[in-house]
Amino acid sequence: MKTIPLAIIGAGPAGIAAALTAARHGLKPVVFDEQPAPGGQIYRALESTPLRDPELLGQDYWHGRSLIEALRRESVDYRPGHMVWQLTRDGEIGVLAGDTAALIRAERIVLATGAQERPFPVPGWTLPGVMGAGAAQVLLKTSGVVAQAPMVLAGSGPLLYLVAVQYLRAGAKVAAILETTSKENRRLALAHIGGAIRGWRYLKKGAELLRELKRAGVRHERHVVALRAEGDETLTGVGWRTADRPDDWQHCEATTLLLHHGVVPNVQMTRALGGAHDWSEQQLCWRPRRDAFGRSDIENFFIAGDGGGIGGARAAQLQGELAALAALESLGHIDGPTLAREAAPARRKLDAELVVRPFLDALYRPGDSWRRPDDDVVVCRCEEISAGEIRRVAKLGCAGPNQMKSFTRCGMGPCQGRLCGLTVSEILAAENDQSLEQTGYYRLRPPFKPITLGQLASAAGGAPEAPARNETETAS
Amino acid sequence: MKPTALVIGGGLHGASAATQLARSGFRVTVVEKNYAGRHASGVNAGGVRRLGRHPAEIPLAVAALARWQRLETLIGDDGGFHPCGQIKVAENDEDMARLVSRAAEVRELGFDHEIILSREELRRRVPAVAPHCVGALACDGDGAANPYRTLTAWRRQSQREGAIWREGVQVTRVDRVPGGGWRLSTDHPDLPGLDADWLINCAGGWAGGLCGALDECVAMQPQALMLTITERVTPFLGPVIGSASRALSFKQMDNGSVMIGGGIAGCIDTGGEHADVRLAGLAQNVQTALGLFPFMRDVRVVRTWAGIEGVTGDGIPVLGLSWRHPRLIHSFGYSAHGFQLSAITGEIVRDLALEREPALPIAPFDIRRFDSSSAAARASHTH
Amino acid sequence: MFAYLKRPEEGRTVTIEYEGRKLIARAGDTVAAALLASGIDRFRSTPVSQSPRGPWCMMGACFDCLLEIDGVPNRQGCQVTVVEGMTVRSQQGARRVSP
């Protein structure tokens, strides 16, 4: 098996910044990315988007141009269309490119696998026509494809406003925004106003987006407490209740419903590697443990960007630089003083970047009933397991997600728990009156994404037999 | 006063023993260091198989199947048992000769559950199997079940019979109490000491360590046995398929996904609580499966995993009384084929604890077979 | 229901076939985007309950946009780029295998 010094997984802002940092220090890294072009989700399709008017997608999107241009220019072995399906603690990476599965070993690995949208389980969320707001953004950026009227946005968080505004700028229509942010959240967020003021740029941006929506006369329903997607074969309408009229289901026609409750780290790889994860009550998600440089608790693995906790694209970029510096130092490529010197400005900027987070996290925190839905709501989309079934099996004494999985197959479908894992852990913790740490999360195993039996059989063909540790070290 | 028993290990054999002991009047406590069915008991391939058993295990497997057939009456749930049959295919004449002599051997022992299938009969029962297969050995009435569901049903039944389960409790020390009986120390602040008349070792992959603490000789290692599961596909296979000469267990589950196993070992981390898959072993296992079902090449693997199990030096379990200590019973080392037997092993443990002769022959599972000094002593005694 | 903001420019399109129907897509689009832009939002029915599904995440996480692409079932429509002459089919229930 070929061994390389540094592999970076993911080509979003964190992965690109890590690659550029390594290249700048004379070490050529290999970047594996599943997407056909660099940028991750935030700068997706930046080189090819048909929406060339800079006003439309906005400054934050076009900020990625300098990063992507540098990636193309610098000495980086960038490999798009390469899906990493396996990783071991000793640095073995299973990669699938086209139909070919191969193994390569890296001495240091930077995981920059980013975030995904938080699951948003409501009645009818599996209907065609109901999507994540992030999915609509991908369609807009990559293809200039927009939902036809009537389209409804529901949930909370800056992305919700951003998608609405991008739609309006593109000449598309938004029938309504159903905002789930509670009055309580506004009060609780005020406790963090100090950070928010220091991070005033974010507040200003949010206020501008809201102004733009108001100017356009978009219907904006606030304090929504319940939501349902309606239709049989496909979405035909949306129903909701508000805190002010808690007994009335209000209703509007819709052929597209875009849901958003923020983003959460993609922990598939850090979990499969057996790294430590902490529950963040602030962000309501699992965060793989990492230090200020992104060093994980797994030797030779580094975590950069939103995959380690949500900080946004600018923070991810800085974390990418830091993780690469730490990796270079641990390779002996740079010394300790160089690491300290080079890291100082990035760490300062990162602190400034993250100062607004507690405010945003408190303001846009989805309420309990959104994260732990009623019994009739499907939680595991693949195996079609409802919240009620999870509660029923919990009563049989299945206290954790892995028992639940063995019993019901919940989380065992092709998405491997990406769309149900958080919900299952949160429901079980509430049912058993346990903490999230006590409840835990799915044990994840390769392949991170399905590969064919043929690819699996051939992948190990040329590979030497891995040492059978069990035969020597754990003899009883 | 009721006699008391402590069962170490909340897997299938522990749950089965706890159920039968509690039903027979023992006050039972099960101590499990993690959660019930955390390792092999919860995540094995679920084969309910008499086919191909070691001769010593055949009487137990036959008796166990009778329990599986009325599992719902016994423990309130059928465990998802599906008597779809088990078939071991021969890929060449040499394989076939081996199977034919195996069938004869089983008949000679007085059993008739293993039958030879001709090439045509195999094709009729398993049209999907590769055309080079020349025949098979089959066992009708065998099948498969859902391991974790079965384990949960046994656990709940034992609780209905009065057994107490202590999960997340690690035994740190085992002491004999003067005058007979046992005392366990644990890492749990609320359970500093647990006392009982009888100690039942059902500790699976960790039973060897317990034996070491008790000065018992046994050749056993924990192994992490790997499984692969695919996406759902349309139905093409009824029975569970094995191979005459290669390590394989291949079955299509009710939901359409295909499970591939065969007792291939993965890795166990040094802490011993976490098993990892080993790619080379998996690849070899999958290659074997593709040899018999080549059309599966483009079907996707959704997940792989490994469950930790105790595997003995001779591949058959330890089941019986200790000869070193009174009131100690061993039931472990099922070596990747204990799932089916769990339906009967609890009854044997119960008989031993009631100090009566078990209804089934268990001499071959005696722990003294691993003790060279005692084996020598027995040998000299008989001559 | 989705559509292109502006029809893809001449000469920068590819034609694919979906369930026997010709669809014009922008070169570089994913199969999922191309189908959505042509007004198709129901991609398949599930193996569990035959309930209808279409794309949810468009970033490779959810596996709800599974399609049969050039004869290979269960491919993620949002991760495959359109190619001239590509044949795409909807999937009903579990993927078919033919021994």
Image (cartoon, coloured by chain):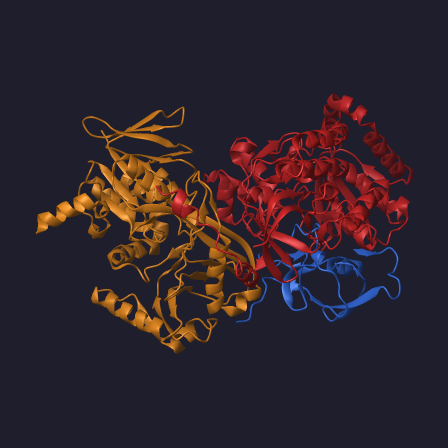
Chain colours: A red, B orange, C blue
Q: Quadrant of residue B137?
A: bottom left
Q: Which one is nearer the viewer's eye here, B285 or A266? A: B285
Q: Is residue B350 left or right of residue B279?
A: left
Residue in view at x 40 percent, y 61 percent: B247
Residue extending farthest to the left is B383
Give x and y (percent) for residue B145.
41, 55
Q: Is residue A244 left or right of residue A209?
A: left
Give x and y (percent) for residue B25.
25, 36
Q: Quadrant of residue B202?
A: top left
Give x and y (percent) for residue A428.
54, 37
Q: Is residue B288 left or right of residue A81?
A: left
Q: Examine the rendering and report whether any part of residue B235 can be seen.
A: yes
Q: Which one is nearer the viewer's eye here, A393 or A11? A: A11
Q: Which one is nearer the viewer's eye here, C30 or A222? A: C30
Query: How many labels were placed on the picture?
Result: 0
* On screen, residue A38 above or below B206: below
* On screen, residue B91 above or below A205: below
Q: Quadrant of residue A266?
A: top right
Q: Is residue A146 left or right of residue B34?
A: right
* On screen, residue C28 above or below A303: below
Q: Examine the rendering and report whether any part of residue A254 can be seen.
A: no
Residue in view at x 33 percent, y 25 percent: B193
Give x and y (percent) for residue B84.
40, 63
Name the image quarter holding the N terminus of chain B.
top left
